[in-house]
Image (spheres, rainbow, N blue to C red):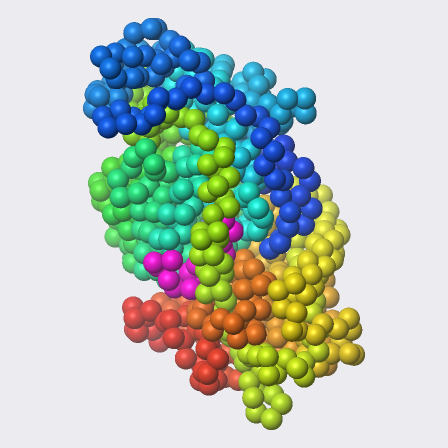
Amino acid sequence: MASLSKQIRKSSKLRKKLLATALTLSLVAPVIGPQVGFADDQGYTGEEGAASLYSGRGAITTYKIAKAEGQPEIEVATQDRILEINGKYFRDANGSKSLDIYEDWTKPVSTRVADLISKMSLEQKAGLMYITTHTPVADPADGKFVTEVNANNVINKQMRHVIYRLTQNLGDIANYNNQMQQLAEGLELGIPVVITSNPRNSASTDYTNITNAQDQHTFWPGTLGLAAAQDVEAVAEFAEIARQEWRAAGIRKVYGYMADVATDPLWARIEETFGEDPKLVGDMNYEIVRGFQTETLGKDSVAITVKHFPGGGARDDGQDPHFANGSFNIYPTEGSMEKYHIPPFMRAIEAGVASVMPYYAYPSNDSADQGLPWHSETEQFEEVGMTLNEGIIRYLREGLGFKGYINSDSGAVAGSAWGYLVDEDGNPIPNAQKVAKAINAGTNIISGGANPEYVIEAINSDLLEESKLDESITYTLSEMITLGLFEDPYVNPAEAIAAANNEENRALAYEAHQKSVVLMRNDKIDGGKKLIPLTNGKLKDVKLYVEGFIGVAPGRNNPNPQKTINEESAKQTAAFNADLKKMLKEKFPNITLVESVDQATHAYLYIKPTQSNWDNNPRIDVNETTGILELDRIIEIQKAVPTITAVNFTNQWLINELEPNAAALIGTFGTLQEAVFDVITGKFKPVGKLPFAIPASTEAVEKEVGDVPSFAPEEYADFEYVNKNGDKYEYGFGLSYSDGNNGKAVGKPDHADGKK
């Protein structure tokens, strides 16, 4: 939505607020995304690649009482922490040699939590109000991941929630969990650790990125790929399988999935969404919650934190609120929040989601009327970040009936507390005051920092009542007890590795890759036959040239982004091409590969443009800015021989130059190349549908309405791209082998009928 950004810059009120927040950029501290850790260098990190195999390093000894009728499993790292009372066993969390109420699993959760809170100091309560990233580094001598030095926040700051962002095999993660729990077991009160992660079962540009490798999580297509398959039951299968893996490795909380609706094509984080249809986004989030958490949260569950309330997709110029220039949500369409952005969160709440994460942004009063209760007689919204916004959180609880807890986004109560960084005179607002604002507004746990001292300062300064802490940690302690962490926080690395390598589960993941492939064009060549499928009968006459073009995005604060794009894209492209040819020779030996276009009768080109949220430069052109360094070469090959062109859509790329000269066009979404070739060779009939519309041009992106889906009646009428054959690439478009070029969008939702 570029046009509105120009209007906003004319608004003196918003301009003043943006200038004020820009002055505080030096305070913005959350560092998010893949981080260097204790694995060996993994090299190529695209669809294929090697990851460290499980070696058993970091394993610890534990003592267990097996689960039996009327007896939960009890597991400890120190044997004398097991209590036997009247033939039943309990975990002596505080080492008192007697059974406290909070240690008694026969008592109701609420009774146990109340007892524990009564025993806690202010410092311990404040520690439970924070969650921060913990990056372990293995000791090369003994493989120990957790030491007193690198777990300082758990020991000295009384924190018990950590975010784990590394990409490791599940055995290493399990041993990391066990060491963390062993450390916590020896501390006062013995409160266990909750390990949280962003989604980790697919490729990702900016967050936890895995590969298709042994000992890692099963590798699925991206969320856009799941949306392209439009198979809600398959998402339920995925969530159940992922839950087993996460639970086995000791990760008990997910920072995700996203219920955001993709309404601004420039937004880099569209990659993490389920597309632009609010109903499908909601249905898939419902299954994600039920699959990870199970029908009722319990000892086998992994808790879900759905994000980013009230919908992060309503962007302006694609700018993200991790940055000051994207610090607001604007809703130019009357009622768009309740019509398009809120419904997926309602489905997650219906499924019983444990927690909700508001976004950094503040709601702009330049928005059209959204029908929510107004902040005041003159202002629709309080223009402070959603995490600090009492009206937004009250609507979540009272308007939508949410009963769980509110988890801030990383840094949203610190350097990214947009609208609440400086006072009216331009003076920085103290951190303790920000913390008090967020907690009083209804936030229950603060992410992205390790500053419990601010909570204590807020209480000592009478900005915050201690009862508000008790209210918040009641939620999180109840979750810990319900998850069974007070009885058995330990996991078995062997079971984690077995979960990772379950062949039936991997087969289901592979089928999801096949279903994610969208056939977008399929021309007739060679006497009127469609190019795809290249069945065995056709392949005898085919000499195929293959080449990939892989884009790599620069990281945050990169001093020379284009230099990094050029160098890293070239490296990744070379590695990808070697892997692609190796895979084809092994999996598709009936395909004759040639080394040059001159020798070829056909070509296959794979185009993977990339933009990162962290370089704060929204763009969807397919050229050197998104890592596609040889666009002219791509077009040259397309013109030389009939070419199957596959494009990986993490965003709604502008394909004006890629599409016209292709003989066949395929859309992928973090999809394995083997699955793409299953469709190309007829092993799997294409069923995928576009999870979003493809924009017609830069002008269409300029004119689109940033808070509605492409099929909404309010959207710009000529938004969708029309291909060479007259097909409109609207939401839900996807061909089968037999489809004619009639532009039919098979998957177009019924609720789009009112459009245009």
Of the pair 26 and 67, the residue shown nearer to us? 67
**Res 751 quadrant in image:** bottom left
| Nearest the eye: 111 or 51 | 51
626 relative position to 351: left or right: right
* 563 in relation to 494, above or below: below
14 part of magenta stretch: no
Q: Which residue is drawn at the image coordinates 34% and 58% (left, top)?
A: 233
Q: Is residue 736 above or below residue 693?
A: below
Which residue is painted at 30% across and 43% down in the image? 294
What residue is rendered at 56% in x and 39% in y? 169
Rendering coords of residue 461 (x, y %)? 38, 15
Return the x and y of residue 242 as percentages of the image width and height.
43, 46
Question: Is residue 531 shown to the viewer in this render?
Answer: yes
Q: Position of residue 642 (x, y in %)?
A: 66, 81
Residue 152, placed above or below residue 132: above
Q: Position of residue 131 (x, y in %)?
A: 45, 28
Image quarter in which the C terminus is found: bottom left
Seen at 65% across and 63% down, the residue is 586
Query: Vertically, is 290 above or below 631?
Result: above
Considering depth in this image, is 122 or 353 the residue closer to the camera? 353
Q: Quadrant of residue 358?
A: top left
**Furthest-bottom residue in this view:** 527
Q: Which residues are magenta?
A: 217-234
Q: Is residue 695 visible?
A: no
Instruction: Give the camera-side residue of 679 and 397.
Output: 679
Total numbered labels placed on residues in the image: 0
Q: Is residue 448 left or right of residue 709?
A: right
- In the picture, measured across the screen, residue 635 lies left or right of residue 370, that is right
